[in-house]
Amino acid sequence: MSLPNKYGAIIMPTGSFCLLPKSLIKDVLTSFYNHLEVGGSVILDLLLPEDFISGKVETVSYELGDDTGILFTINSQNIDWVSQKTSYIHRYELLKNGLIQQTEISNFILYWYGISEFEMMLKHAGFSEINHVFGYGDSSQKSLITFTAVKR
């Protein structure tokens, strides 16, 4: 990423950072650092797979209108402890009047990082004043970690 502006903050919520392939993380963090003003912060959430169960299937429906909705199915495929990634198959079905109109299937991979590991990555990119909280301040929610770090 190369933009002409500098920013006071760069925010990546709800685990979006975990979608990025690990091979890009060093460059992404360096780019974030380079695009911040001095004193600017990066704020991002990481997810940990604390409740991952291989083979688990969950289905949720979302109403879009009176006769339209989405049926979303998550099929938990695999957890790779060495590569620190989980894989899923996501199926999205557009429903109209109870009938499937369209189906999309995607392979969904999430990467995770340990706390000390990610702090070192942020330091390596040049950040300081690195902090983290669990579950947006709810310490019982250990699978979501919000990191903040400052460019000095």
Image (cartoon, rainbow, N blue to C red):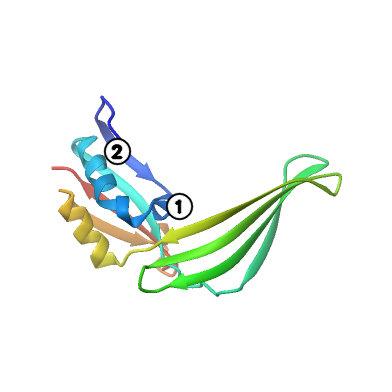
- The residue labelled by disc 1 is 14
| Quadrant of the drawing holding the C terminus | top left
Dot 1 alpha-carbon crowd within 10 angstroms: few under 14, some 14 to 19, many 20 or more: some
Front-most of residues 24 and 125: 24
Residue most toward the left? 152
Front-most of residues 141 and 92: 92
Q: Which image quarter: residue 141?
A: bottom left
- The residue labelled by disc 2 is 9
Contact (Cβ within 8 Å) of mark 2 with mark 1: no
* Residue 31 position in % (x across, y down): 25, 40
Q: Residue at x 55, y 62 (%)?
A: 88
* Residue 106 position in % (x across, y down): 58, 53
Q: Residue at x 22, y 44 (%)?
A: 30
Q: Residue at x 39, y 51 (%)?
A: 20
Horizontally, residue 13 falls left or right of residue 102, namely left
* Residue 119 position in % (x across, y down): 22, 60
Horizontally, residue 18 falls left or right of residue 55, namely left
Q: Secondary structure at mark 2?
A: strand
Up the image or down, 34 lies above or below 111; here it is above
Q: For the residue marked with disc 2, what is the amino acid? A: Ala
Q: Secondary structure at mark 1?
A: loop
Q: Which image quarter: residue 85?
A: bottom left
Up the image or down, 12 lies above or below 22; here it is above
Q: For the residue marked with disc 1, what is the amino acid? A: Thr
Residue 62 numbered mark, or none: none
* N-term-proximal mark, 2 vs 1: 2
Up the image or down, 51 lies above or below 10; here it is below
Horizontally, residue 117 falls left or right of residue 141, namely left
| Quadrant of the drawing holding the N terminus | top left
* Residue 120 position in % (x across, y down): 19, 60
